[in-house]
């Protein structure tokens, strides 16, 4: 019996120790064994140390930082370069914060001129861009600039919304120079003597298209009207002969290449425009020696004087005026000195009483006293290429007449009548016209003295573009220099019972371009 109690007691101790171990390890409490009588053990409370308070850590919470991209600064880089026939301009780099354009423009002396080409640029930095241009419209100095694509996306609108990109330092642009590695249109021509047949010889002319070689007058650096032309084939042309109207020529002439847009219709200055190369017309200046010539209008002798428009002379000389007898030069009735070259607007005094309705004008070369005409002892009749110069005939009883030209009005709203010849004081009157071409309403007038009057200006109302007007001569028959018409005596002059008048058209005023192509 004592052995049983001892086993029971030992078994209870084992279970107790197992319970304590499980409790200390945080395990689950095991199932209770069947109750076994045990000896109660009084548990002593365990000593517990006083807890020590720890400081609480405070954590500052900050927002997450989002990295910002570096802003793109507008910039452009382009180098001097060579341009060939393909017309490709190379742009080293272009930077823009927004969609933009790289634009290449010609040099207009005062800055960027006509747009030659452009290409789109994406936001950011782009390198090795190509811009295609017409190389024959380029100048040796070019401008590259950045323009915003501010209008319709992907459509270049300038002038318009796609204006140059501006920074605090101004617009983004670069100036660069180009050399041309391509055949260029050209003219080679020498100074020369013009024969009486008016032939001018051009050594060489090269053009990339069929066209015209046109000779223009050149006076004080101003290019005048065409006075002769010859057709050109595409490519090289040699020994080109151009017949010019040498009586309309100046001492300096300009040869120019023109397009041929109407062949076989002939040369038309309105449509066959100058050929452009490197931003300018293709030209060559040359000097000419012109055959001797006398140009004078038929006119009355007023106060024993007449007026010559132009005299060409190879040497210093004289114009001698001869009366007429049986259709041949008779007596010398006056003379006027001329210089070598071209002489304009010479006034000569004649022995009016000895004048005949027909007068001969003959050029003499000076060989003796330069201050005095001395013929027949000296100052012989001029020759050219060993041929005598044909006398010029002037009539002294032409009546009254005028010459008009179509024109556009200037800012002063004045019309210009190139010539009025009258044998008495007169009025030049400007009219509108009726449907059948007769004078209608007077819109301007001006008084003129008898004789030759050149480039007469008359003010008229504005807004007459497209109208055909009439220039009419009126008698100054009432109070001198007071226009008395229709209620006075200043009636229109007549010849053969017809009013003396000339019509002319007022053309539209040419548009003024803000860009001046070279």
Image: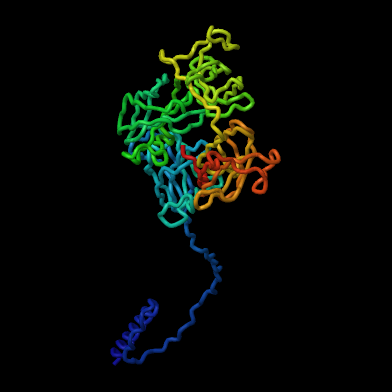
420 sits to left or right of 247: right
* Colouring rule applied to residues: rainbow
User: On the rendered image, what quadrant is the N terminus found in?
Assistant: bottom left
The answer to whether residue 511 of the structure is visible from this angle is: no
Q: Nearer the viewer, residue 105 or 131?
A: 105
Q: Is residue 103 above or below residue 1?
A: above
Q: Farthest residue in the front direction?
A: 326
Q: Position of residue 135 (x, y in %)?
A: 38, 37
Q: Position of residue 64 (x, y in %)?
A: 48, 62
477 sits to left or right of 162: right
Residue sitting at 59 percent across and 34 percent down?
A: 422
Q: How many marks?
A: 0
The answer to whether residue 142 of the structure is visible from this angle is: yes
* Image quadrant in which you'd find residue 258: top left
Q: Is residue 54 above or below residue 22?
A: above
Q: Farthest residue in the right direction?
A: 479
* Image quadrant in which you'd find residue 103: top left
Residue sitting at 34 percent across and 88 percent down?
A: 32
Q: Nearer the viewer, residue 69 or 142?
A: 142
Q: Nearer the viewer, residue 93 or 137?
A: 137
Q: Position of residue 146 (x, y in %)?
A: 46, 46
Q: Position of residue 229 (x, y in %)?
A: 38, 31
Q: Nearer the viewer, residue 55 or 82?
A: 82
């Amino acid at each position: 019996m004592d052995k049983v109690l001892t086993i029971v007691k030992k078994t209870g101790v084992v279970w107790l120790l197992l319970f304590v171990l499980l409790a200390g390890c945080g395990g689950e409490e095991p199932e209770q064994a069947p109750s076994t009588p045990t000896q109660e053990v009084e548990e002593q409370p365990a000593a517990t140390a006083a807890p020590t308070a720890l400081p609480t850590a405070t954590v500052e919470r900050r927002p997450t930082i989002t990295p910002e991209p570096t802003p793109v600064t507008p910039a452009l880089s382009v180098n001097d370069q060579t341009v060939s026939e393909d017309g490709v301009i190379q742009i080293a780099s272009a930077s823009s914060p927004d969609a933009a354009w790289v634009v290449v423009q010609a040099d207009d002396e005062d800055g960027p001129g006509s747009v030659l080409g452009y290409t789109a640029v994406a936001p950011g930095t782009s390198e090795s861009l190509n811009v295609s241009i017409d190389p024959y419209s380029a100048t040796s100095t070019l401008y590259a600039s950045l323009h915003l694509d501010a209008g319709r996306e992907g459509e270049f609108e300038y002038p318009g919304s796609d204006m140059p990109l501006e920074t605090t330092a101004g617009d983004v642009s670069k100036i660069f120079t180009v050399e041309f590695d391509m055949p260029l249109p050209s003219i080679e021509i020498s100074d020369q003597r013009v024969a009486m047949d008016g032939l001018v010889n051009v050594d060489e002319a090269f053009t990339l298209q069929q066209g015209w070689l046109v000779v223009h007058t050149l006076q004080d650096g101003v290019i005048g009207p065409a006075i002769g032309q010859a057709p050109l084939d595409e490519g090289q042309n040699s020994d080109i002969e151009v017949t010019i109207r040498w009586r309309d020529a100046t001492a300096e002439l300009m040869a120019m290449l023109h397009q041929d847009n109407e062949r076989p219709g002939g040369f038309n200055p309105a449509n066959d425009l100058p050929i452009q190369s490197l931003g300018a017309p293709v030209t060559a200046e040359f000097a000419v020696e012109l055959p001797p010539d006398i140009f004078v209008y038929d006119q009355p002798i007023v106060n024993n004087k007449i007026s010559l428009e132009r005299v060409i002379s190879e040497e210093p000389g004289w114009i001698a005026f001869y009366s007429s007898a049986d259709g041949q030069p008779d007596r010398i009735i006056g003379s006027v000195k001329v210089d070598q070259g071209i002489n304009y607007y010479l006034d000569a005094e004649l022995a009016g009483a000895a004048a005949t309705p027909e007068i001969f004008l003959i050029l003499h070369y000076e060989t003796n006293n330069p201050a005095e005409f001395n013929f027949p002892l000296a100052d012989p009749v001029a020759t050219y290429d060993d041929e005598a110069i044909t006398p010029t005939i002037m009539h002294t009883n032409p009546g009254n007449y005028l010459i008009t030209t179509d024109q556009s009005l200037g800012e002063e709203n004045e019309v210009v009548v190139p010539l009025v010849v009258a044998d008495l004081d007169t009025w030049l009157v400007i009219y509108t016209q009726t449907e059948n071409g007769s004078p209608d309403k007077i819109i301007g007038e001006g008084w003129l003295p008898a004789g030759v009057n050149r480039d007469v200006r008359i003010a008229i109302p504005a807004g007459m573009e497209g109208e055909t007007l009439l220039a009419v001569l009126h008698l100054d028959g009432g109070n001198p220099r007071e226009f008395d018409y229709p209620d006075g005596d200043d009636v229109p002059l007549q010849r053969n019972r017809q009013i003396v008048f000339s019509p002319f058209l007022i053309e539209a005023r040419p548009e003024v371009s803000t860009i001046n192509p070279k």
